[in-house]
Amino acid sequence: MNEYEINEFLTLKLEEKTTNIYVNGRRFGLCKYLLLNIPVQNIESYESINSIDEAADFLGWTVEGQEGVEYNIDPETEFFGHCSNLQAWWEHGYDTRLLHRNLAFPLLKIKNYFCINY
């Protein structure tokens, strides 16, 4: 099992080929997928995007993934991507523009609960 500690409250674990998030030692949920794969030749079309949420809308993401795109990422590489994303989110003061709203806000809510109550 791979494990990566972001800080005292937030840890990611690769368990049975799935990346799971733990907040204060309790399983919070799983990381469903990595959001972006930006081809270098199209980078200019992304310059006006200011958040992951805007990027998801621009790329046509749904709860099932990006329309018309299949990704074949091995679990270890995907785990590294999730760790990197959550590390950057934490290092930038939990900036909600850096994670999708479906993950950032629930994580902040539960993190704040543990910070206040423990």
Image (cartoon, rainbow, N blue to C red):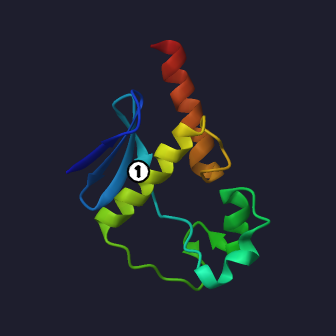
Dividing the picture into quadrants, the one containing residue 21 is top left
Front residue of 42/81: it is 42
| 18 to 29, vertically: above or below | below
Question: What residue did someone put label 1 on?
Answer: 83
Q: Residue at x 62, y 41 (%)?
A: 105
Dividing the picture into quadrants, the one containing residue 49 is bottom right
Dividing the picture into quadrants, the one containing residue 18 is bottom left
| 52 to 21, vertically: above or below | below
Q: Residue furthest right?
A: 48
Residue 31 image offset from top left, x and y in percent: 44, 55
| 12 to 100, vertically: above or below | above
Specify few, some or many for label 1: CA neighbours under 10 Å numbering under 14, 14-19, or 20 or more: many
Counting every numbered tag in the picture gives 1
| 89 to 68, vertically: above or below | above
Front residue of 112/2: it is 2
Front residue of 61/91: it is 91
Residue 8 image offset from top left, x and y in percent: 39, 27
Front residue of 69/86: it is 86
Q: Residue at x 52, y 29 (%)?
A: 111
Residue 42 image offset from top left, x and y in percent: 67, 82
Q: Is residue 36 left or right of residue 1?
A: right
Quadrant position of the C terminus in the picture: top left
Q: Is residue 62 left or right of residue 14?
A: right
Q: Residue at x 56, y 25 (%)?
A: 112
Residue 23 image offset from top left, x and y in percent: 42, 33
Q: The disc labelled 1 sits on which kind of residue?
A: Cys
Q: Secondary structure at mark 1?
A: helix
Q: Is residue 77 left or right of residue 92?
A: left
